[in-house]
Amino acid sequence: MKLITAIIKPFKLDDVKNALQAFGITGMTVSEASGFGRQRGHTEVYRGAEYTVDLVPKVRLEVLIEGSDVDAVIDVIVKAASTGSIGDGKVWSTPVDNVVRVRTGERGVDAI
Amino acid sequence: MVFNTGDTAWILASSALVLLMTPGLAFFYGGMVRGKNVLGMLAQNFVTMGVVSVLWITGVYSLAFSGKGKWIGDFHQFGLNHIWQQATGFEALTIPPLVFCAFQLMFAIITPALITGGSADRLKFGSWVIFSALWLVVVYAPVAHWVFSPSGWLFKLGAEDFAGGTVVHANAGAAALALVLVLGKRKGWPKERMRPHNVPFVLLGAGLLWFGWFGFNAGSALGANTLSAFAFVNTNTATGAALVAWMLTEKLRDGHATTLGAASGAVAGLVAITPACGFVSPMGSIAIGIAAGVICCLAVGLKNVFKFDDALDVVGVHLVGGILGALLIGFFGTKMTNGANGVLYKGGWTLMGHQAVAVVAVVAYSFIVTFILAKILDLIIGLRISEEDESAGLDLSQHAETAYETSSTGDGARFLSSQQVAN
């Protein structure tokens, strides 16, 4: 089993979600995140005092999958999240030891 | 005494308008502080409405307006005794003395409230209550007497101040500077970012101030007449000009015209036209507004040069704007509106001289007495909150409240019975 984590631009969330649903993904977790990579923040000015804001708002999207179609799922996310400009984000996968569905107690692949 | 019901109705309405300026100021300031200090700011402004309302009626009105003294009033109208008599020099008023007293009360509320913008984020609540009460007696009452009362020495000299450019704004600005120097800088200033937590609040507050200011300035004609109409139109015109001038200055200097700049420019214009609104022509008010918008916009940078942490720019806006408006009467004052002619209307430099004396006297007195008062209070009761309380914010440390729900998952709060709280 794999956990796919994607950091994407917030306005791309709908596109990515729709593409994943169309692909057949049945669940995901989304949270607000902030950080920076090559894209840096912006500058704000209040009564002439300048502040640089380093951390850029992003969306963190997590999907648990069985494991055989990792590359396909990553491709779906990358295609839907891409704008071609700096700050589009990153996607990575990590191995997952076990998963339990809280309601039924099912374990492993059955719980996905 | 026979009173004019139209005049009386307008001054009663104006009094209510001026009262609304203090909640407006609270939001103007409250939006500019960080989210953990917004209730602290609102509380300091609202408590001033409470404290001054009681003190003014009890005795401070008498100290400011009763009697024939050059420097200060007397005890003749303590507890509103003899309130059926007009204040000394105001015998020709067409409104009941009690209405005049109520109108002046609202000025006495907002003047100390203006100071809270300088000392924002680090002043103990209890110390503010005591400071503001004492300041009202030792600074506001004498200064109001000098300038507003016909017995006062600056009034007699011929210095003009229609609605309080010196008494209210330069006075509060100088006091804020003194208090800030005694208090010290906010922890982390100027390195740490302390951006306004709610700019929409700032605009809401500025809108309420602008609205209430019609009572402040046009009400200062103390009647509903042509002079009040001039004050009304001059106030609105100067404010519009200053708003545009401030935004234009920002656009040229920083690349963007900001909403905070729009609110700040409007307030700077209101401040500068306050002393002048009953003495200049509407064309003169445009010049005063433009001057206030540009100069105050540049003046808020002074704190960064001289390293005094005037948190919300009471010096840059109220001290500088108040002085500017008071001095420009000496230039743009015209008999066609009211009062004496200034330089532009071939009145010579006499009026300008009187204005300069009033500015220097009020600013020097307010700064020195406030500095001494703040030092004494700091030694006896302490003015500043602890470093830990400052980090936590005024809302939590001074009032045991928070303004906002910041976590979507909640913070685990649960109700304790009142008895448990007491224990």
Image (spheres, coloured by chain):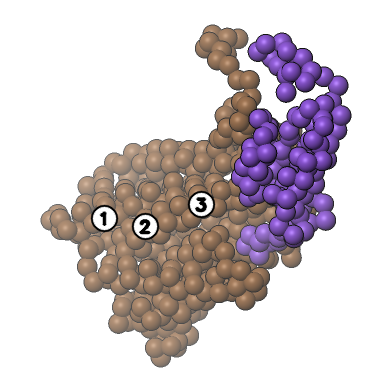
Chain colours: A purple, B brown
- Height in image: B141 above or below B390? below
Q: Which mark is residue B11?
A: 1
Q: Which residue is mark 3?
A: B200
How packed is label 3: few (under 14 Cα within 10 Å), some, or many (20 or more)? some
Q: Which mark is residue B211?
A: 2
Left or right: residue B24 versus residue B4 is right
Comparing B113 with A11, the one in front is A11
Q: Position of residue B349 (x, y in %)?
A: 48, 85
- Height in image: A16 above or below B1? above
Q: Is residue B111 visible?
A: no
Q: Position of residue B229 (x, y in %)?
A: 27, 69
Q: Residue at x 41, y 76 (%)?
A: B285
Q: Position of residue B322 (x, y in %)?
A: 51, 66
Chain of the residue displaying label 2: B
The N terminus of chain A appears in which quarter of the rendering? top right
Callout 3, which amino acid? Answer: Pro
| View extreme (left): residue | B2
Mark 3 and mark 1 residues within 8 Å of each other at the beta carbon: no
Q: CA distance from mark 3 to mark 1?
A: 31 Å
Callout 1, which amino acid? Answer: Ile
Q: Residue at x 20, y 55 (%)?
A: B8
Q: Position of residue B115 (x, y in %)?
A: 55, 51
Comparing B138 with B223, the one in front is B223
Q: Residue at x 49, y 76 (%)?
A: B290
Comparing B86 with A2, the one in front is A2
Chain of the residue displaying label 1: B
